[in-house]
Image (cartoon, grey):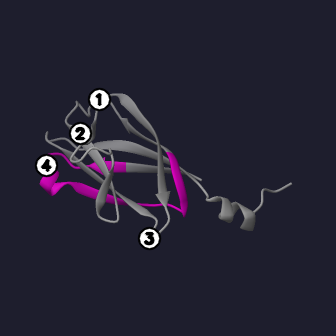
């Protein structure tokens, strides 16, 4: 399953006042994710991802993704085994203007799920 989420990050926010968005996914394994920072993000727009209250992307504690007119891709292997299957995107931007980033996440079902729903022939 491929999921796409536009995420508007309000200007004049900080890490402690970050905007959040719930990214509803399906049970399975995240195998790829990306964040596109459009022109105007100006390297002052930051994004992190949490699952069940803990930061999972980027993996380094208190790290974040930040860029301008750039697509950051990260192949990863994050299992989503316990409901709710929701990531929380956290974003902040230290300058006054709002910006919309674009998040793409690919989830592959676990093998036991593919047995329940075999591909169409």
| SS class, disc 2 | strand
User: Against 3, is 41 above or below?
Assistant: above
Q: Do the residues labelled 2 and 1 touch (CB within 8 Å)?
A: yes
Label 1 Cα crowd, 10 Å radius (few <14 / some 14-19 / many 20+): some
User: Against 44, is 13 above or below?
Assistant: below
**Circle 4 is placed at which residue position?**
14
Image location of residue 106, percent across then percent down: 54, 48
- Is residue 8 a member of the stretch shown in magenta? yes
Q: Nearer the viewer, residue 52 or 26?
A: 52
Disc on res. 68 = 1
**Circle 2 is placed at which residue position?**
45
Q: Nearer the viewer, residue 109 or 41?
A: 109
- Which badge, 3 or 2, is on the more N-terminal residue? 2
Q: Which of 119 and 44 is in front in this view?
A: 119
Tell me where the magenta segment starts and ends, as one range. 7-31
**Circle 3 is placed at which residue position?**
84
- Mark 1 or mark 3: which is in front? 3
Label 4 Cα crowd, 10 Å radius (few <14 / some 14-19 / many 20+): some
């Amino acid at each position: 399953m491929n999921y796409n989420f536009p995420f508007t990050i309000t200007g004049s926010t900080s890490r402690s006042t970050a905007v959040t968005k719930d990214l509803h996914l399906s049970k399975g394994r995240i195998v790829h994710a990306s964040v596109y920072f459009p022109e105007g993000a100006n390297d002052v727009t930051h994004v992190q991802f949490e699952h069940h209250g803990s930061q999972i992307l980027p993996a380094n504690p208190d790290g974040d993704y930040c860029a301008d007119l750039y697509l950051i891709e990260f192949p990863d292997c994050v299992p989503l085994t316990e409901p709710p299957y929701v990531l929380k995107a956290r974003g902040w931007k230290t300058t006054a203007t709002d910006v919309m980033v674009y998040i793409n996440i690919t989830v592959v079902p676990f093998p036991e799920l593919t047995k329940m729903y075999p591909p169409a022939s």
